[in-house]
Amino acid sequence: MPTLPVIQNSVVSSLGGEIMDTKISVVEKGAIARVGALFVEAFGHSPALVVSDGNTLGIGGFALIQSLEQKGIQVRQCCFAALPQVYADEYSIERVRHSLAQDASIAVVLGSGTLNDITKRASFEVDRPYMVVATAPSVDGYTSYGAAVSIRGFKQTLPCNAPTAVVADTNILCAAPMPMIGAGFGDCMAKFTAGADWIIADQMGLQPIREDVWTMVQTPLRVVYAEYKDIANRDPRAVGLLFDALSASGFAMQVMHDSRPASGAEHLISHIWEMEHLEMGGLPVSHGFKVAVGTLAMSFLYEMLPRMDFSSIMKKPAQSWEERQQSIEQAFSFAPALLEQILPISKSKFLSGDALISRRRAIQIALPHMLRRCTVQLPPFRELRQVMAEVGCPLTYMDINTTKANFLHAIRAAQMIRNRYTLLDLLYEAGFLEEALGAFDLGVY
Ligand SMILES: [Zn+2]
């Protein structure tokens, strides 16, 4: 059993460092002034390359560089423009990689999701560790391995290491724009439905829950949920707890080498919108906002689940593979090149004949246990929606600039893309997916 990292305001080196890339994690008021000392602790006196953009440089750049220089660290900079907003693509990665390649610098990224993903991947390409100084509690990707980047226009998660050191100054975090705090809160609330999906996979005997990893994610999630009012009021302590919970998800993914603990169908729905380049006001809708809408959609479906009559499960019609292939081709007509990756995955999880009959029997047997466990796992839909509204999360497809037709399409398509068993797979296999989606017409959603 690995030792679990304790995240709150702590140095992680002695706590599970042997299984995680991240050795140092500090979340506290005024932490920016400690960056230099923590850099030396992690990397000795290597030179540093501070990666930022026109916005983040103004937030903590001066204090960060001062802190490094006071420890005798030689600092160079790689600063992207404030506008147009930097994009995590092959060009931005190449710019940082090229800058790193000039000497033996270790990157220190000052920013949030996008800059972190660029730096993470560029550092991986030159085989170097890196450090993150977070500017917003907007996403759980700070501490995860893997970078969400767009190569030749296709969003994908490229392999790379998690940061060696993560520093978050709560004075800076709580001054972040409210939509970034809302995005992080949405990404955190996603762990409710991701957890429920894991319960389903566990109950079906498809992916057992690992208790230690489960606790790492689900315990801080509940702390954040209880503190939502203080987070909405930008209280530094509460916003720090949100950052801790997001970090914990990243640590759990590092320990598991899998995103299962942090990501279920709500994330798969958001991946579809990422592939479709969903935009609002000319800017990409943030990860946390897409995930927030996906989370409430899945929370709603979970609430509908006990009302569905599964006694007819064995009589429900099922698609043939040819029909299934046709639906997939239709669902991804917006990007046919993706079918090359999606069809083999869908085929690998497609069940027919006796395999489908025994799966439906297994669902029937597992269902009462799942319902009981999910009732304990999930807050009531209306309560969760109210809490998310107060912290500035988007609630429905309209809030992220899309239509109901596209929303339903995203849910259907989400079930086609990954080999990760979720409620959507269960509903599809049981022959209840369309009926379940009909519930979004009831007006209570
Ligand atoms: Zn996420």
Image (cartoon, rainbow, N blue to C red):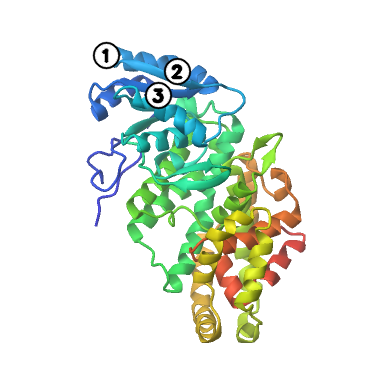
Q: Is residue 76 above or below residue 294?
A: above
Q: Is residue 110 visible?
A: no
Q: Is residue 226 above or below residue 341?
A: above
Q: Give how far apart the Cα atoms at labels 3 and 1 are.
A: 21 Å
Looking at the picture, how far across and down is residue 328, in whole percent?
63, 65
Query: Image point 50% across, 20% down: which residue?
Result: 59
Question: What residue is disc 2 on?
Answer: 61
Question: What residue is disc 1 on?
Answer: 72
Question: What residue is disc 3 on?
Answer: 99
Looking at the picture, how far across and down is residue 221, in whole percent?
46, 49
Q: Answer yes or no: do the residues labelled 3 and 2 have beta carbons within 8 Å? A: no
Q: SS for tag 2?
A: helix
> Viewed as shown, does residue 92 lie left or right of 395?
left
Mark 1 vs mark 2: which is more N-terminal?
Answer: 2
Quarter placement of the C terminus: bottom right
> Viewed as shown, does residue 247 lie left or right of 265?
left
> How many dots with numbers?
3
Q: Amino acid at mark 3?
A: Ser
Query: Image point 54% across, 20% down: which residue?
Result: 54
Nearer the viewer's eye, disc 3 or disc 2? Answer: 3
Q: Which of the numbered marks, if any, corresponds to residue 327?
A: none
Nearer the viewer's eye, disc 3 or disc 1? Answer: 3
Query: Image point 69% across, 70% down: which residue?
Result: 434
Looking at the picture, how far across and down is residue 225, in whole percent?
52, 47
Q: Amino acid at mark 2?
A: Gly
Quadrant hosting residue 283: top right
Q: Amino acid at mark 1?
A: Gly
Mark 3 vs mark 2: which is more N-terminal?
Answer: 2
Question: Foreground residue, 101 or 238?
Answer: 101
Q: Answer yes or no: do the residues labelled 1 and 2 have beta carbons within 8 Å? A: no
> Viewed as shown, does residue 249 lie left or right of 69?
right
